[in-house]
Amino acid sequence: VLSFVLAFLFGYLCGSIPFGLILTKLAGTQDLRSIGSGNIGATNVLRTGNKGLAAATLLGDMLKGTIAVIVAGHFGGPNAAIAAGVGAFIGHLFPVWLKFKGGKGVATYIGVLLGLFWPAALAFCAIWIAVALIFRYSSLAALVASVVVPVMLFWAQHTALAAVFALMTAALWIMHRANIQRLMNGTEGKIGSK
Ligand code: G3P
């Protein structure tokens, strides 16, 4: 139990590093929380017009999840890896440093998945890209891709992991409730527009 809790806390600390905020602050662009959706993720960094910074945010928010999983797995085994992954995802959503107001979790979800079962992470990215190319909504792409993941894990007979990711997908959808509202009334911002 202790290694489980330690892994979760370690994951939480990794996940709570807000790369979008840190990188935009270092680059001296506008405060993310006052532009676009107000979110601290890569999609909103892209709205500052700085593509490189958006890519770096995506990578940082992703890899913090992957690294948490790999390190915890190395020291504590597969269950610790899962605990660290869930911790990282929750850390990104509710970072203590930002009064628990974090991001929507897409990049970290992918990063955790990459560390735990990489084929599903590849599938997520492929679906994300396909939906984004057709509809040009970052949020919609993530919402669709995240539904496929638990199904794929279940199908690959990773039942416990499927259950964990079903809960993470549910959390992802809840975090996107404002986006879902905007998608339904046609006011969601498209990729490439401000
Ligand atoms: O990952 C966040 C993305 O799905 C939506 O971001 O800034 O458009 O709310 P945003």
Image (tube, rainbow, N blue to C red):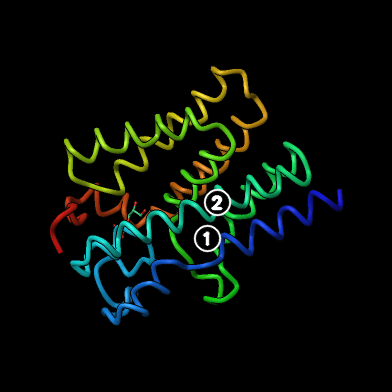
Up/down of 83 relative to 123, above or below: below
**Residue, far right:** 1
What is the crowding at mark 1: few (fewer than 14 residues within 10 Å), some, or many (at least 20)?
many
Displayed quadrant of residue 28: bottom left
Residue 13, position in %: x, y?
63, 64
Residue 95, position in %: x, y?
56, 68
**Tag 1 and tag 2, C-beta contact below 8 Å:** yes
Is residue 15 toward the left or the right of residue 181 in the image?
A: right
**Helix, strand or loop status at disc 1:** helix
Indicate yes or no: mark 1 CB to ligand 1 under 8 Å.
Answer: no
Identified by mark 1, the residue type is His
Up/down of 165 relative to 155, above or below: below
Up/down of 67 relative to 50, above or below: above
Residue 71, position in %: x, y?
67, 49
Give me the C-alpha separation between circle 1 and circle 2: 9 Å
**Residue carrying label 2:** 65
Which one is nearer the viewer's eye here, 191 or 188?
Answer: 191
Identified by mark 2, the residue type is Gly
Which one is nearer the viewer's eye here, 147 or 76?
Answer: 76
Label 1 or label 2, whichever comes before in sequence order? 2
What is the crowding at mark 2: few (fewer than 14 residues within 10 Å), some, or many (at least 20)?
many
Is residue 2 toward the left or the right of residue 61 in the image?
A: right
Residue 194, position in %: x, y?
15, 64
**Residue carrying label 1:** 92
Is residue 125 toward the left or the right of residue 6 in the image?
A: left
Task: Identify the residue shown where x is 55% and y is 31%.
Answer: 117
Please give the label number shown on residue 147: none
Up/down of 180 relative to 115, above or below: below
